[in-house]
């Protein structure tokens, strides 16, 4: 067995005195598509934010391959790793948020070029070629010079996916990528995600789209109140859940 791309062990995250992640374990293998489902407030976004090191964790560990992320334990004490390492490590993860978070004063092309030029220090011409390639990949080659306000929600989210892909991440993290969209715009975004799955991209997807989770996931993690209540292949989670909490949650969605 090769080392998982990501290993999470006993992860604890607190806000003030409340532990919103209470000892989460999960593993992600290369090329795996893992979906996270669960009620609102169960800690799904917090978990993704911890993976991408947008949050400092309070206990447990996250490994990227063999490398410990974010924190390290020195003689039993949690220490932050150096900022330089955090920046380097964070690049392994591409993140797509519910609300797109595009720069409103930049065109689609400029949004996608921003990471490659500012973070990867790529020359403008190379970054431009790369950005156009990524916009083509999400079906928006013809919209490169449009500003976010001139694009539909579905198009904006596809630009956000292209922007994440332009950083050549090893793992893509999606946090409810379609839940801010009008229903008729959901499919164009799901098609892009399906395409990435077909290409073998390693992905973690927090979603309420049960048909997507059933169709493309290799495994599904069910969270409730900061804990993983069940993890398994989609056939188990959706057709033969072992946990009563999973059964109740899934019954509400289908
Ligand atoms: P989900 O994505 O599953 O809906 P979240 O990870 O957003 O859940 O939230 C988990 C819990 O953590 C919720 O109770 C939420 O109110 C709380 N929470 C999230 N972010 C913060 C924050 N920045 N400060 C305080 N509490 C937070
Ligand atoms: Mg959330």
Image: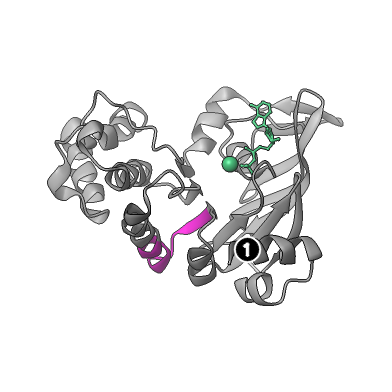
Residue 200 in the magenta stretch? The answer is yes
Decide if residue 175 is on the left or right side of residue 200.
Answer: right
Q: Quadrant of residue 48?
A: top right
The image position of residue 87, as x and y in percent, is 51, 30
Q: Secondary structure at mark 1?
A: strand
Res 25 seen here: yes
Residue at (24%, 23%) from the top-left corner? 105
Total numbered labels placed on residues in the image: 1
Binning the other alpha carbons within 10 Å of mark 1 as few (below 14), some (14 to 19) or many (20 upward) gives many
Residue 69 location (% of width, % of height):
64, 38
Q: Quadrant of residue 103?
A: top left
* Colour scheme employed for the rendering of this structure: one colour
Is ligand 1 closer than 8 angstroms to the Cβ of mark 1?
Answer: no
Residue bearing the label numbered 1? 220
106 vs 26, nearest the viewer: 106
Question: Residue at (38%, 54%) from the top-left corner?
Answer: 183
Residue 236 within the segment the image draws in magenta: no
Asked whether 201 or 19 is in front, the reply is 19
Name the spot of residue 139 as percent of width and height, x first. 22, 55
Magenta region: which residues? 194-204
Please identify the quadrant where the N terminus is shown: bottom right
Looking at the image, which residue is at 76% across and 45% down? 225
| Residue 26 appears left or right of 152 | right
- Depth check, front residue: 251 or 119: 251
Relative to 79, residue 143 above or below: below
Report the quarter where the C terminus lies.
bottom right
Q: Quadrant of ligand 2?
A: top right
Q: State whether residue 71 is above or below residue 160.
A: above
Q: Position of residue 124 (x, y in %)?
A: 19, 31
């Amino acid at each position: 067995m090769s080392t998982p791309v990501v290993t999470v062990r006993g992860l604890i995250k607190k806000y003030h005195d409340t532990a919103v992640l209470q000892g989460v374990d999960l593993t992600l293998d290369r090329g795996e598509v893992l979906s996270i489902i669960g009620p609102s407030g169960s800690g799904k976004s917090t978990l993704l934010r911890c993976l991408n090191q947008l949050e400092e964790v309070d206990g447990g560990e996250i490994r990227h391959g063999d490398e410990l992320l974010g924190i390290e334990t020195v003689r039993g004490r949690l220490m932050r790793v150096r900022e330089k390492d955090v920046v380097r490590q964070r690049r392994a993860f591409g993140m797509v948020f519910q609300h797109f978070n595009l720069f409103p004063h930049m065109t689609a092309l400029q949004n996608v070029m921003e990471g490659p030029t500012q973070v990867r220090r790529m020359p403008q011409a190379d970054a431009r070629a790369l950005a156009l390639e990524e916009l083509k990949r999400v079906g928006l080659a013809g919209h490169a010079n449009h500003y976010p306000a001139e694009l539909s929600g579905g198009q904006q989210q596809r630009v956000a996916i292209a922007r994440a892909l332009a950083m050549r991440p090893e793992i893509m993290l999606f946090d409810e990528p379609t839940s801010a969209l009008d229903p008729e715009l959901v499919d164009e975004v799901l098609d892009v995600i399906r395409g990435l799955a077909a290409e073998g991209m390693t992905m973690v997807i927090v979603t309420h789209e049960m048909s997507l989770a059933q169709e493309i996931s290799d495994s599904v993690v069910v969270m409730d109140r900061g804990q993983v209540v069940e993890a398994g292949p989609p056939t188990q989670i959706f057709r033969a859940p072992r946990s009563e909490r999973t059964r109740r949650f899934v019954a509400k969605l289908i």
